[in-house]
Amino acid sequence: MKEYTEFFRISATSAGRHLTAFFVALFLIAPQGASAADAYLQAGMAMPAPSGAQKICQTYAWACAKQSTRRLGSEAEMAIVRDVNRRVNTTTPALSDEKQYSRSELWSLPTRAGGDCEDFALLKKRELVRLGVDPRRLLLATVLDRRRVPHAVLVYRSPKGDLLLDNLTDKVVGWRSSGYVFLRMQNPDRPDQWVGGFRA
């Protein structure tokens, strides 16, 4: 009987250790999984295109393209993304649609006179697609900025999460770091459609 008692005591101790190790592993894994999912914008519903953006797919085929014929390494691609964001910001004058077109909203490429936030975003997307970045990783989006003013940015789906190309800063930052409220974004699977209802 003593041998059986000792056997079960050892087995129980061993099982306890395995169970403890299992839950410790779960504890370590769960935050990483949650953090990875949290790095990307998660939409909850389909949305109509923003005002002024309903015809961008017909006007600019590259704005709604679904695949690229080139493949870039992640480090090279990130360098290109940063360069395009900075270059467009520094070479394109800011000019509202009201002043340029006498209308409140029109999504188009900047003219020689300049463009507003969504025009910057469109130009960045065109340049990045031209340089070989997969268009499915480049998503136009509308937000409320830190002052809760309507604004537009380009979302870059990097391997580590969604990053923003923004005409208000030359830094490429994560979507959560921006402090913006996200309203609508091109559907990553169907860029001719838009999504919203993002999870905070």
Image (cartoon, helix red, strand yellow):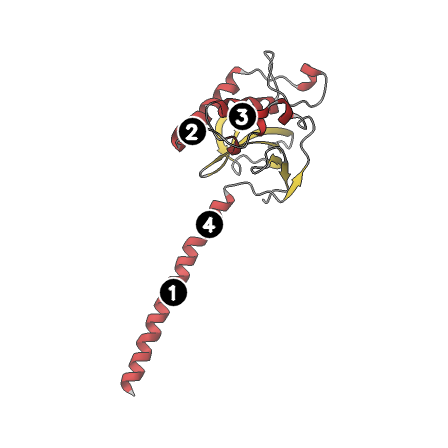
**Is 1 situated above or below 173?**
below
Residue 33 disc label: 4
Using the image as rendered, state which of residue 142 and residue 180 is in the foreground.
142
SS type, badge 2: helix
Marks 4 and 1: CB-CB under 8 Å? no
**From the image, which quarter does the C terminus lie in?**
top right
- Closer to the chain start, of discs 4 and 1, is 1
The amino acid type found where label 3 is placed reads Lys
**CA separation in Å, label 3 and label 2:** 13 Å
Q: Residue at x 29, y 81 (%)?
A: 6
Foreground: disc 4 or disc 2? 2
Question: What separation in Å lies between label 4 and label 2 (alpha carbons)?
Answer: 25 Å
- What secondary structure is marked by label 4? helix
Which comes sooner in the sequence, label 3 or label 2?
A: 2
Tell me if 180 is positioned left or right of 99 in this view.
Answer: left
Instruction: Please give left or right for residue 126 compared with residue 26 in the image.
Output: right
Q: Amino acid at mark 1?
A: Thr
Q: Element at badge 1?
A: helix
Q: Residues within 10 Å of mark 1 (few under 14, many from 20)?
A: few
From the image, tell me which residue sits under label 2: 77
Whichever of callouts 4 and 3 sits on the residue coming sooner in the sequence is: 4
Q: What is the C-alpha distance between the residues marked 2 and 1?
A: 43 Å
Q: Nearer the viewer, mark 2 or mark 1?
A: 2
Question: Circle 1 is placed at which residue position?
Answer: 20
Query: Looking at the rendering, which quadrant does residue 147 occupy?
Result: top right
Q: Residue at x 30, y 75 (%)?
A: 10
| Rendering coords of residue 30 (x, y %) | 45, 53
Marks 2/1 in contact by CB < 8 Å: the verdict is no
Query: Where is 2 relative to 111, above or below?
Result: below
**Residue 150 spot, x, y in % from top left:** 65, 30
Q: Amino acid at mark 4?
A: Gly
